Every structure is written in C-alpha cells, then in structure tokens.
Image (cartoon, rainbow, N blue to C red):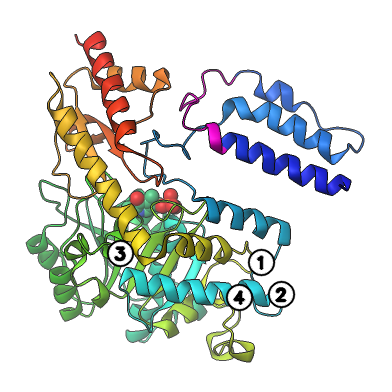
Amino acid sequence: MTELGDLLADVAARVTRYRESVADVPVFPEDTTGVREKLGDLPEKPAAPADVIRRLADAVEPALVANTGPRYFGFVTGGALDAATAADMLATGWDQPAFNKITSPAAAIVEEVAGEWLKDVLGLPSGASFGFVTGGQGANTVGLAAARHHVLARAGWDVERRGLHGAPPLPVVASEERHATIDRSLRLLGLGTDAVRPVRADGQGAIDIADLERKLDGPAIVCLQAGNVNTGAFDDVAAATEIAHRHGAWVHVDGAFGLWAAAAPSLRRLTTGLAKADSWAVDGHKWLNVPYDCGYAFCAHPESHRAAMALTAAYLTGQGEGGVRAPSDFVPESSRRARGFATWAALSELGRSGIAELIDRCCALARRFAEKLDACEGVTVVNDVVLNQVLVSFGDDTDRVVEALQRSGECWMGATTWHGMRLMRVSVSNWSTTEADVDRSVAAIEAIRNREAS
Ligand SMILES: *Cc1c(COP(=O)(O)O)cnc(C)c1O
C-alpha cells in the first residue's frame, strides 16, 4: 500500500477498534490529565502524517466520552449509525464544499434528495424548503430568520434591507420552558430576548394554550416545542397553530429530537397538526443517529426562507442553476460541509421501518427505565414518560447520586433543575442501546443510591 493507504487504513482500524469496544469502556473518561502535555507545543518543522495521527489519537483517546456507545444517556445525544459514520468519513475524504452545484454537484444533489426524504418521513409538507445546518441551534436560527422576514414583510418592512432600526415591533410568544437555543437565536437575529412574551407551561412542561391566546394580540412569532428537553412533552401544536394563525402569527416548531415521533406510527398522534406550522427545526445528530454535526431547518414558505438566507438578493436566486438548488441559499453559511451524505446514508441504512423501530425502541427503553427506577426505594420518576425522556428524583441525594454515577463509568446521565426540583435526566436516543444496557444501568443506579442515601 501507499503511504496514504497505510494512513487511512490505520485511521479506519482505529475507528473500528473504538466503535467495537465503546460498549465496554468507561462511559466517561477516568482521568483526562496529561492530554495537553501529550499534544505538545506548536512544532517548528513538518512531520509525517502517520506520526501526527498517532500522536493525536494517543493523546486524546483517553479523554473521549463514549456517547456513541449504548449507555450514554446524557443530554439528548443520539449515537452514530455505521453507514452514516462511514459516509461522513467519505465526506471528509471527498472534501466537497456544499455551496452550490458548481462547487459540488454531488453535495447539492444528495442534499436535495435527502431533504425530500426527510420531509416525507417527518410528515412535513412536500412543498417545504429545507436547509442542512449544524444542529438544532442553527435550525432554530434559520426558522426564526424566515419568520422575521415574513412577519415584517407583511407589515411593509424589508428587514433584510433596512435592518431592525425603526422596524415595527415583533413580539415573540414562547413557552417559559422553551429551549435555551431559542433565546440565543433571538439575540443573533437582533430581536433580543426582551421580545419574548413568556407563556406558562403545564405540569408536564407543555405550553398552556389559554395563556398562549392571552399573550397574542396580533402578528408575532410563536415558538412551539415538539419534545420538551426535560420531559419529552409535546405542545398541542394543532390548537396553538390555529390560534396563532388567527392572529396572523408565524409558528416555529423546535422539534430538535421530538419531531422524530412523527416517523413512528405509534407516536404520530403526539405531532397532530404539525404540518400546519410555518417552520420546523430538527436535529440529525440526535435521534436519527447521524454523526455530529447535523441538523435541518424546514420552512413552509420557501420564498421567505430564501429571502432571509440567500447569499445574493432574493430576486436573483431562482431554483438554482440547471434545476439543482444551491444548498447555501437556505442556511447562514456559504462554504460548508457536505452533510447530505451522512443523512442520506442514515435514512438508507434504516429505511422507513427502521426509523420507526429506532424511535419506538428508544421510547420502550425509556419506559423500562421509568418502571424499574420507580420500583427502587427512595427513587421517584416525576414526569409522564411519553417519549424518550425520564426525570428521576432521589430527594436530597440527587446531586450526590448523579455525580457518583458519572464517576462510576457504568453509564452517564446529567442533572437538571425542572419545576424547582433537582433531578437526574435520562435520555434514550442511541440505536445500539439494549434492554440489558438499561438493566445494567438501573443496577448501577440502585447500588449507588443505596450507598449514597443520607
Ligand atoms: C438539543 C436541542 C436543541 C439544540 O440543538 P443542537 O443540536 O444542540 O444545536 C434545541 N432544542 C431542543 C428541544 C433540543 O433538544
């Protein structure tokens, strides 16, 4: 083999070894001291690629978090499917700038195909436009930018040209339990967090419809949530959208992970009315198990989407040259990673039935967690487990139990504060998690809680 062949074969072997052992290593690294030292100082001279890679891997492998393995239940991280991982490695090797069809027809066409497939599987309108972004944060920013354009244009204000100085007010009506990324998007878009009129959430964290109606008095941006990041609860999108549209408001749905419920027939009822919204944010790197990073923004008003995002003025951009759309006209970046390859591979590896099965299985495992933990002494599950999220209280011992659990390396869950309670948050979103992984994790939690109980 050539030197390059040896290098890439070595990397493939390392990735293989890592992925094949990830279920058996401590879920969180035991000791990350020494990483900086091993990375060394900026070298004065060139080095052989094989040496560089050996030094990098040797330095950082001890500090890797096994979030791609089956017992990582922190945040909502997902895993990485085999085909999607391999496709992402190809994307790196091919190094395609997914700007438009001139810089890479391959990247532009695969995004177009994968975007159509995503709309189909998520039950979104077939005419919706889409952009491949870095994640839920990026997708919320794109959806809210399209909303800003659309609502202000109807008020006779061209925000892309004139900015927000002197613009009509643009209230944002959003749940008090909205995800923190909504606020950052509002900051970036110049709307500011003071624009938010917070709407009460109910006992499970879903938006209070009567309070939503009280907060609306005309055109606005309404932010709904499909999947509360703590409880998994869904806002009543059908009722909320009906009210919002009556007031001339735009409805943006943050469905970073929860929108995938639409892909599982058994859960689809949670997303009733979803297709009537105006924009949607969804992650690829969470529940679809595409490697980091990958998210999708969808918009029911392609002209507003493009007006907010296109590189050139809206009137200059058609459907793209030669019938292929320019992917960069729907996102805030121009030169960008070709994320379509990994998404296409994930959707192809799973197929429609495999996606439904992945979502169903994760929810069943979350219910298994809830049943088993609730049966343990001194342990209470505090939310209705409607999706893949479980909130667990150990009373006054919660923080101590979670910290000890994280140190154990057996599994990893995070802590959260929700409705005034300190809680352990369990999220099941990895394709490789099994019932045995849940049972092993529950056994670890029970042992630690019995040791740590005050
Ligand atoms: C994770 C998440 C986000 C942010 O997504 P990133 O991919 O981390 O940018 C936004 N909203 C909700 C509900 C989430 O769960």
Q: Earlier in the sequence, mark 4 or mark 2?
A: 2
> Left or right: 25 with respect to 143?
right
The crowd level at tag 2 (other Cα within 10 Å; few <14, some 14-19, many 20+) is some
Between marks 3 and 4, how big is the CA–CA gap?
Answer: 25 Å
Location of residue 374 in the rendering, given as x and y in whole percent from the top left corner: 13, 29
Quadrant (top left/top right/bottom left/bottom right) for the C terminus: top left
Residue 165 quadrant: bottom left
State the SS at label 4. Answer: helix
Identity of the amino acid at label 3?
Ala
Give the answer, above or below, for where 240 lies relative to 58: below
Between marks 2 and 3, how big is the CA–CA gap?
Answer: 33 Å
Which residue lies under the disc numbered 4? 108
Location of residue 436 in the rendering, given as x and y in whole percent from the top left corner: 32, 32
Residue 190 in view (yes/no): no
Which residue lies under the disc numbered 3? 263
Closer-to-camera residue (332/451): 451
Q: Earlier in the sequence, mark 2 or mark 1?
A: 2
What label does residue 335 carry, if any? 1
What label does residue 103 carry, if any? 2
